[in-house]
Image: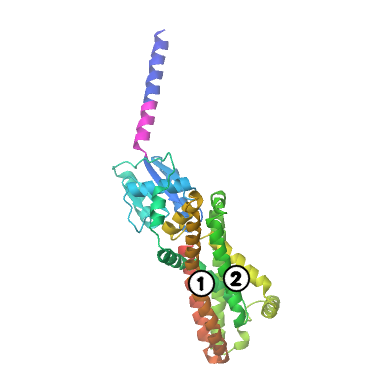
Amino acid sequence: MRKFALFLIVLLLLAHGSVFWSMAESENKVTSVYFYSPTCASCNSMSDFLEDFSKNHKNFDLRKYDISDLRNKSLLDKYNEAYKVSAEDEGIVPVVFIRDKYYTDEQLIRANLEKVLSTPGAKTLEISISVQTHEKDISRFKGFTMPSVFLAGIINGLNPCSLSMLLFFLSLLAVKKDKILKIGMSFITGKFLAYVLLGTILFQFLSMFDFRLFNTVFKIIFAIVLLALIIMSIQDYFAAKAERYDKIRLQLPQAFRRFNHGVNKKISGFANLKIIVLLGFLLGMIISLGEFLCTGQIYLATIITIFQTNSQLSLQALISLIVYNSGVIIPLVILLFLVYKGKEIFDVSEAIRERLHIIKLINALILALFFILILLFF
């Protein structure tokens, strides 16, 4: 009987210790509130880092919120207000709230997270919303002016991925100068339409699709093609410098050269360039999937929220969205015009063969710059 009683006492002590240990462990956990967008490439990198960090640190409690769900967008506004987020950081994702600090820069969170986790400090605020009123968004939206919305669109349009992709796409095509405008405008139209559709009737699509795999595969393919073009440009540089102009395109196998020449000939002679124009249009839409809600968020996200949730202001929000998207494509239109005029200069330069090696070297350097920008920003 005594043994049984002793056994029960030990069992109770163990149970009590287990509960106490569990409570202590829970008490020592540091909560991290993380907001992201599924179409944001930097968010993908941050998500991977935080998930790996969470697996390796048992006292790290990661809570993730996708702002393409407008309920989470409202929650982000609450956290921005509670943490007194600066105006330039407001609405930016990725953003991490931990203890009494917030981080919008991936490198800062990587450098400081271990220290923040191990140093005692204030608890991360626990904020919840029961009713979505979107008062913050309505107030912010009413403060927008069309010039400010248009300017925000232009800033977003300076996305290095989109600019480099347009130039890259045009550089692959051996087309006459007068056809460059048609091809470039198809790309720009595709991007403009994708932004409008994603901000209106296709917005719910964002939360259904995992863009991380899409961005990773696209980045790898694009990087490989860019590297190949860089190598070919450098080879062309040495061939042109040695005045071996007949060797400029002989780095490729004979069969591929014939195929490449045939494709270029067909492209150049294709009456309306329907296929290439369609490809440009689709490429513009695809690029938009990897950019949407990634930059210029305070304007774009607010406009979308108003359109999706407020019937009285939806028409004004739609007009603002169109104005914003018009600003987004302005840098692309300018770049297209420069390429169009540059083609004329390049055609003249080709007649001056002694300068061809300089052109090839500049081309290689530009492609290398695009390669670096894609790795850093896409």
Would residue 275 be seen by someone viewing this image from the given angle?
Answer: yes
- Please report the bounds of the magenta region as a residue range: 18-29
Viewer-nearest residue: 368 or 67:
67
Please identify the quadrant where the N terminus is shown. top left
Q: Is residue 335 above or below residue 239?
A: above
Q: Taking 205 as reference, is 85 left or right?
A: left
Amino acid type of the residue that numbered disc 1 sits on in the rendered structure: Leu
- The residue at 32%/55% (across/down) is 86
Q: Taking 340 as reference, is 258 left or right?
A: right
Amino acid type of the residue that numbered disc 2 sits on in the rendered structure: Ser
Q: Which secondary structure type mostly characterizes the magenta part of the structure?
A: helix
- The residue at 48%/71% (across/down) is 330
The residue to which callout 2 is attached is: 186
In this view, the residue farthest toward the top is: 1
Secondary structure found at label 2: helix
Q: Is residue 163 above or below residue 312?
A: below
Q: How crowded is the residue under tag 2: few (<14 C-alpha within 10 Å), some, or many (20+)?
A: many
